[in-house]
Amino acid sequence: MSAAQGITCEGRTVLLTGAGAGLGRAMAIALAAAGAEVVCAVRRPETGAEVVKEIAAAGGRASWVECDIKVWEHVERAVHATVERSGKLDVMIHNATSTLSAEQKTLEKLDDAFWEEIVSTNLRAAFWCARAAYPHLTVTRGSLILLTSGAGIEGASVLPEYGATKAAVRALVKSLAQEWGPDGINVNCLAPAGLTTAYQRVFDQDPKWADHIRASVPLGRVGDPMSDIAPTIVFLASRAARFITGQTLVATGGRTLLL
Amino acid sequence: MSGLGSIALSVCGTPVSAALARAFEGAALIREDDHRSRTAAAAALARVSEKENLQALIHAWVPDAALAARPLARLDDQDWDAGCERVIRSTIVLMQAAYEHFRERGGVIIVVQPTIGLAGQKNFAAYSAACEAQRCLVKSVARAWGRRNIRAHSVVAAPELFGGEMAESAPRESLLSPLSLRGRTSEALLDSVVSTVRFLLSDGASNLTGTTTAVDAGRWMPL
């Protein structure tokens, strides 16, 4: 059964970065369950093969392409592979992020190497995904979806670089919504607070941090990737969201209230 | 501010930058080369504080590349870096350099930028992204450094005040705006930017931090 019951992505071809693990994996499975043909862009081939196998076992359609989103040629190749396989691209989703993105440090401790890791995966890759997908989205009057975060809305004392890149993505979406609206393309952000690989890594290191996060969420938990977060991406990727553009859908259990 | 110290003002060729330089005549001007790296920024602010303690950093720099209208699909990687990532890096290294001066005595950081980060602007996607990153950095350091009496603010001003093609592409009025910009001169808005910055630097604002003040006659209404 689809993770977003009643919402269909039937006939939509979706290219999803970071589809091999965490939120991305749940999104891929949910999108396929909702009827989409999903191309999973993954850094590690073995993760792509596993997700595709799971989708196929459930009767869905998916394939994978190796893609390090910090390399422009890989992003371009992933888009071309999608169009070659499916004949079109309806939805481009940039979900991939760095496994270090939840590493905590205040701004004075930020160094160039860490900044490059975060900005290249979160922001520059978003630009590249948008640039590579645009010619194909104009054909399908499709959708671009970028992942942001509550940290990009309210700021974050110990994740300043992460917040900055995620805030930048939100403005990118607003500008592109205006720029690409005449082409029939809608552009949106999803701000999830789901149990990502990066979150899990921090929680494992410091269980107190997990308690702190949970205590700050009115709904009392970090979102489950499949049951809490995946339905929101299915909605944004569906034609049901076609009149929504330039927006950030916040799925943080009420933790982020200052949109 | 009580106990006046020195102000570092990061400037460029925009009208709003010129207005700030006129208003804060004694401020030390920080130029483009001064924020190309963390080392350069540290050296620049060290020079500023040689005679007087540094008390405030005003970052109003905008690269020329950011003010040129261009669809995102036509941006190459160099354009992207010049219009977006370079702006964010300048903000990070100047904030880091300011922190070294402010961490014992406190201080104020103010970033002045156009409203396009809040609202987006077609053909300015790269710079709009940079603006929102700057505004989020302001919030993050306001949270992290507040206990050291370091305050941080964003002043977001009408795009007309930044010149270039951005000024030409800015909508003249909005149906949603209670105060149409029609009839309001750029000079009056520039004065308002200066007044807002003066207030945020003052003791009267000593309990404010992390704020965004829009100086655009009500076209946009951020929280």
Image (cartoon, coloured by chain):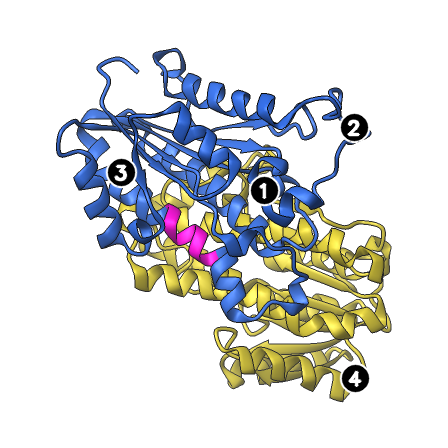
Chain colours: A yellow, B blue
Answer with left or right where residue A227 lies relative to residue B32: right
Q: Which residue is mark 4?
A: A86
Q: Are marks 4 and 1 on the same chain?
A: no
Q: Residues within 10 Å of mark 2 (few under 14, many from 20)?
A: few
Q: Nearer the viewer, residue B194 or A41?
A: B194
In the rendered structure, find residue B163 and report the number of the disc placed on it: 1
Q: In the image, residue A18 lies at what x, y percent?
A: 56, 70
Chain letter, disc 2 residue: B
Q: Quadrant of residue B220?
A: top right
User: What is the tally of numbered marks visible in this picture?
Assistant: 4
Quarter of the image with the N terminus of chain B is top left
Q: Main secondary structure of the magenta part?
A: helix
Q: Residues within 10 Å of mark 1 (few under 14, many from 20)?
A: some
Structural distance between the alpha carbons of marks 4 and 1: 45 Å
Give the structural element (helix, strand or loop) at label 2: loop
Q: In the image, residue B140 lies at what x, y percent?
A: 41, 39
